[in-house]
Structure formats: structure tokens, C-alpha cells
Image (cartoon, rainbow, N blue to C red):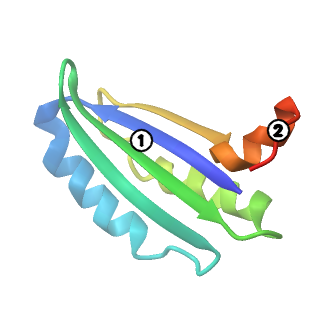
Amino acid sequence: MLFLETHTWPMEKSVDVGQAFVKSVQALPPYIKMIGPFISFGGDGVKACTIHDVEKGHEEEGFLFISKMLVEFSNIGGQKFTLEPVLTGADALPLVGLSS
């Protein structure tokens, strides 16, 4: 299962966010593969998008682990997070009666 995490923060909090990120990914379990983060700048500061690819059979514990990982950032002000399950385009095609 894929989970899309988006994370925004003010530019001036980048060092704090970077330190929390390095700490949080050190304990990544083997059933979660992290793709990204992909970083963009502008507007309100910094935006990061990360795909968490959670191995089949570990979806619930993977979601909980990622959620707890985000708590590492909770003491840094000005942040916003989203964490949502997503499908690849190929996996979504059958939902509209098509195949890849």
C-alpha cells in the first residue's frame, strides 16, 4: 500500500525539520520503503512530498509507524502534514472499468 505524505514548514525551520528527519528515518522498519522526500521552495516556505511504500500485510502497522514518525516533528512550529493512502494510475484503472 502506498501512503502519500505532504509536509510544509516555514523556511526558517528547515534546520530543525532536517534534524528531526535524520533522526526519524534511522528507525525505518524493513517493511516500509521511502521514496523521496521531494522538496520544493516558494510561497509559504518549504514543501516535501514523500511516498511510503508499505509491504502487503503490514499496512496497519506501517500507517501507525509513519504517523508516529511524524510526531517527531510536532515540537517545531508552523508545520502542516497530510498522510493519505494513494493508488498508482495502473491500480486505479480497474475502478473505472479499464485495464492496463
What secondary structure is found at the residue carrying circle 2? loop
The quadrant of the picture occupied by the N terminus is bottom right
Q: Which residue is mark 2?
A: 98
Q: Residue furthest left?
A: 12
Circles 1, 2 touching at the beta carbon (< 8 Å): no
Q: Which residue is mark 1?
A: 74
**In the displayed structure image, the side of residue 70 where residue 96 appears, left or right:** right
What secondary structure is found at the residue carrying circle 1? loop
- Horizontal and vertical percent for residue 79? 35, 31
The amino acid marked with disc number 1 is Ser
Callout count: 2
Q: Earlier in the sequence, mark 1 or mark 2?
A: 1
Label 1 crowd (10 A; few <14 / some 14-19 / many >=20): few
Q: Which mark is residue 2?
A: none
Label 2 crowd (10 A; few <14 / some 14-19 / many >=20): few
- Horizontal and vertical percent for residue 20? 31, 57
Viewer-closest of 6 and 75? 6
**In the displayed structure image, the side of residue 1 where residue 28 appears, left or right:** left
Q: Residue furthest right?
A: 97
- Tell me if residue 8 comes above or below residue 87 in the rendering: above
The answer to which quarter of the image holds residue 18 is bottom left
The answer to which quarter of the image holds residue 75 is top left
Q: CA distance from mark 1 to mark 2?
A: 42 Å
Q: Residue furthest bottom?
A: 30
- Horizontal and vertical percent for residue 90? 69, 48
**In the displayed structure image, the side of residue 58 where residue 38 appears, left or right:** left
Q: Residue at x 46, y 34 (%)?
A: 81
The amino acid marked with disc number 2 is Leu
- Tell me if residue 14 comes above or below residue 68 in the rendering: above
